[in-house]
Amino acid sequence: MTTSTPPTASPGPTDGVEPGGQACHEDAGEPPGAARQATGRFPYRTIALGTGGSTVLMVSALGAGGVLISDPVIGSGPLSWLRYGHGKVLATATLYIGFALVVWAWIRLGRYALRGRVGTRPVLVAAGCWMAPLLVSPPLFTRDVFSYLGQGAQLLHGHDPYASGPAILDELPNVVANVHWMWQTTPAPYGPGFLWVSRSVVSITGDDVIAGVVAMRLVLLVGLVGILWALPRLVRHLGGDPPVALWLAVASPMTVIHLVGGPHNDLLMLGLLTIGVLAALERQHALSIVLVTIGMLIKPTAAVALPFLVWIWANRLPSRHRLVNLLRAGFVSVVLFTVTFIAGTWAALGSINLGWITGLQAPTLIANWLNPPTGIGQLVHGVVQFFVDVERAPFVTVARAIAWGVLACVMVWQWWLARHGGVRAVRHMAVTLLAVPILAPPTLPWYLTWGFVILAAFAWRRKQLAVVVGISVFLVLAYYPTGEHALYNWWFMAGVMAASGYAAASFLRPDPLGLIASLRKPRPSSPTSGSPR
C-alpha cells in the first residue's frame, strides 16, 4: 500500500472491457480521496455474470453447503439426491463453477474501478446483486451460524453460554443438532452484545433453523450498512479511491461469500469499527470510543483498535506535552470504555459476566497450518519425526507461545509508531488488526477482513490489489463449502494455489494464459488486409 495515486493503464483489445469503456487518467493535481468521474458504461454484463454465479452458489449449496442434519426442504423428495453420493459431487462441482463466475465478475469490476470506468454506484449495485441470492442460501464454507443460534438459545433458556456449550440444551433440538461437533460442548467466545443479538433472533425463529439462518444474516447486514456509510467518508481522510475501496471491502468474495454467505458476526463488529474510526478522524472522540467498545461487545477483537484511537484523541488536545495529552485522553477513554462495557454487558446478560475472557481460548482448539505459528510447529515436528517418535502438541504449543511474544512486540511497536495520531495511527491500527489473526491462533479466513476493511480506504497500487485478489480467492477455497478445512488435502490445495495465482494474474492482465482467446473463433480476414493470419 501507498498513499500515492494508483497508476492507470491503457486498455488493450483483450481486456474484457464492455463497449464504450475508456481509460480514465487522474489529474495529477487531484486531491487524495477525491471522487473521479466514471467514463465507461454501466457494467450490466459484469454484474449479471456475478449474479448468475451467486445464484448458482445458492442452488448448489442445497446439496454442497452447510446443509442441515435433517433438511425439511430437500431432506426427502425428488431433490434429496443432491445431498448424497454422485448428487453431492455434482452439487459441489457446480458450486465451484458459481464461485469462479463471482470471482471473474469481481476481477472485471475491479479493473474498471481502478481505471476510472465505473464509479461507486455500479460497485454497490454489483455487491447488492451478488449478495441477494446468498441471503436465503444454506451457509457457505462454514457452519458457525448454527453455533450462533445454539448459544443464543442457551441464553434464551436460562443457561450460561460462557460455562457450557449448546449440547446442554434440552429445548430446540434442531438448533442443537446442527451445531458443529467441536462446538457442542465449548463455551461461547463472543461478546455479551452478540449473545444478546443471537438470543433475540432465536426468540423469534425458535427451532426453525432455516428461518434462524436467514434472520441472522439480515441482522448482521446492519454491520454492512455501517461499512457502506462510513467507508466512502473514511476514503476522504485516508487518501484512497471510493470505487476501489468499496470493490475491495464490500464486493470482495471475502465479504460476499464469507461474511454474508457464511454468515459471520465479524460483519456486525466491522460496521461499528469503521464508524468508530471515522468518528475519531472527525473529532468525535468520545463517540468513537463508545462505538468501538460496543463493537468489542460483539467480538472482542475490536478492543485492539482502542489504544490507537487514544493516540488520535491525544494529538487533538491543546497541550504541547504529549505525555500529558496521552494521560488525559487515556483517562477519559478508560472511563468511557468502563461505563459502556458495564452497561452493555448488564443490558445483554443481566449481570457482569466476564466468562467471554476464558471463552476466547475455545477457538485455539483449531490447529492447522493456515495459522503460520501452528504451521511452523507442525513442520518442525514433521522434521523431528523422521528421527524420533514424538508428540506433535509440544511443538505447536512452543511455536504459538513464541508467536504470542512476537505479536505483543508488534502491537506495542505499531502503537508507538502511531503516536503522531491522524492517518498514521489508523494505518498502524489496521496493520495490527491484520497481524492479530496471522500470529494469534487460530487463523480463520474471514478474520483477515478485520484489517482489510480499514486498509481498503487507503490508496493501493495495481500490483498490490492483484496480491489481495489472489489471497482472497485462496482464503475462500481453503475451506470446503461444507465448512471443513481442506488444508491437508495437498492435491486440492495445489489446485487452490494455482487458481489463486491465476486470479491474481488475471487482475493484471485479462486471460493471462490465453484460455478464453483459444476458445474464440478466429475473425475472418478483411479483403483489404495483407496476408492471411
Image (tube, grey):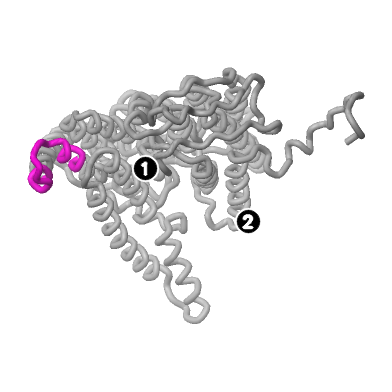
Local secondary structure at mark 2:
helix
Q: In this rendering, would 390 be left or right of 149?
A: right
The quadrant of the picture occupied by the N terminus is top left
Residue drawn where x is 70% and y is 33% of the image? 14
Mark yes or no: residue 351 visible: no
Q: Position of residue 158 (x, y in %)?
A: 22, 36
Asked if residue 315 lies in the magenta stretch, the reply is yes
Q: Which residue corresponds to the image point at 39% horizontal and 53% vertical from the top-left?
A: 438
View extreme (front): residue = 29
Looking at the image, which residue is at 12% across and 36% down? Answer: 317
- As rendered, which of 138 and 1 lies closer to the eye? 1
Q: Secondary structure at mark 1?
A: helix
**Vertical relation: 264 (above or below) 201:** below
Q: Distance of mark 2 from mark 1, alpha carbons? A: 30 Å
Amino acid at dot 2: Trp
Labels 2, 1: front one: 1
Find disc 2 in the rendering and name its residue: 491
Residue 403 place in picture, x, y as percent? 34, 62
- Amino acid type of the residue tagged 1 in the rendering: Gly
Whether residue 471 is visible to the viewer of this picture, yes or no, is yes
- Relative side of 370 to 115, left or right: left
For this orientation, the residue located farthest to the bottom is 387
Lower position in the chain sequence, tag 2 or tag 1: 1
* Magenta stretch, residue numbers: 310-326
Q: Does the magenta-highlighted stretch encompass residue 153? A: no
Image coords of residue 12 (percent x, y): 67, 33
Q: Nearer the viewer, residue 523 or 266?
A: 523
**Number of residues whose C-alpha sits closer than 10 Å to that of mark 2, classed few (under 14), some (14–19) or many (20 or more):** few
> Quadrant of the image for the C terminus?
top right
| Residue marked by disc 1 | 451
Q: Nearer the viewer, residue 129 or 105?
A: 105
Label 2 with label 1: CB-CB less than 8 Å: no
